[in-house]
Amino acid sequence: MAKKSTVSRGLRRARPVQRHNRCNLCGRPRAYIRKFGICRICFRSLASQGQVPGVKKASW
């Protein structure tokens, strides 16, 4: 879970500064999946629960 101060600081930054996309659920700045708007960790947990539409867990 990202610190609230880090997330709020990113929102306050000036427009010309490059910002990272952050996970909508946990605030993680890395491993962000743009199509779903969440990080890989949240994506895996939601996909395994069947809560991400159009995604099913691969089985061999």
Image (cartoon, rainbow, N blue to C red):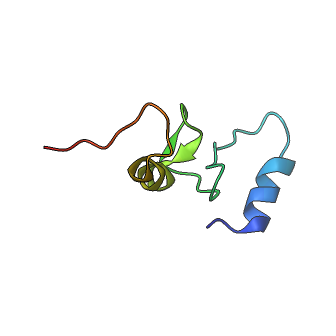
* Numbered circles on residues, count: 0
Compared across the picture, whether 59 is left or right of 17 comes to left
Image quarter (top left, top right, bottom left or bottom right) of the N terminus: bottom right
Residue 40: percent from left, percent from top: 45, 49
Residue 34: percent from left, percent from top: 55, 34
Pick whichever, 18 or 44, lies toward us: 44
Pick whichever, 53 or 21, lies toward us: 53
Q: In the rendered view, would you say 55 is above or below 2?
A: above
Location of residue 36 by image quarter: top right
Q: Which residue, as the protein is rendered here, is positioned at the far left?
A: 60
Location of residue 21 by image quarter: top right
Which residue is at a point 81% across and 57% down the rendered structure image?
A: 9
Pick whichever, 17 or 36, lies toward us: 36
Compared across the picture, whether 53 is left or right of 5 comes to left
Which residue is at a point 49% across and 40% down the rendered structure image?
A: 52
Location of residue 26 by image quarter: bottom right
Compared across the picture, whether 50 is left or right of 7 comes to left
Which residue is at a point 56% across and 45% down the rendered structure image?
A: 38
Image quarter (top left, top right, bottom left or bottom right) of the C terminus: top left
Residue 48: percent from left, percent from top: 38, 52
Which residue is at a point 86% across and 50% down the rendered structure image?
A: 12
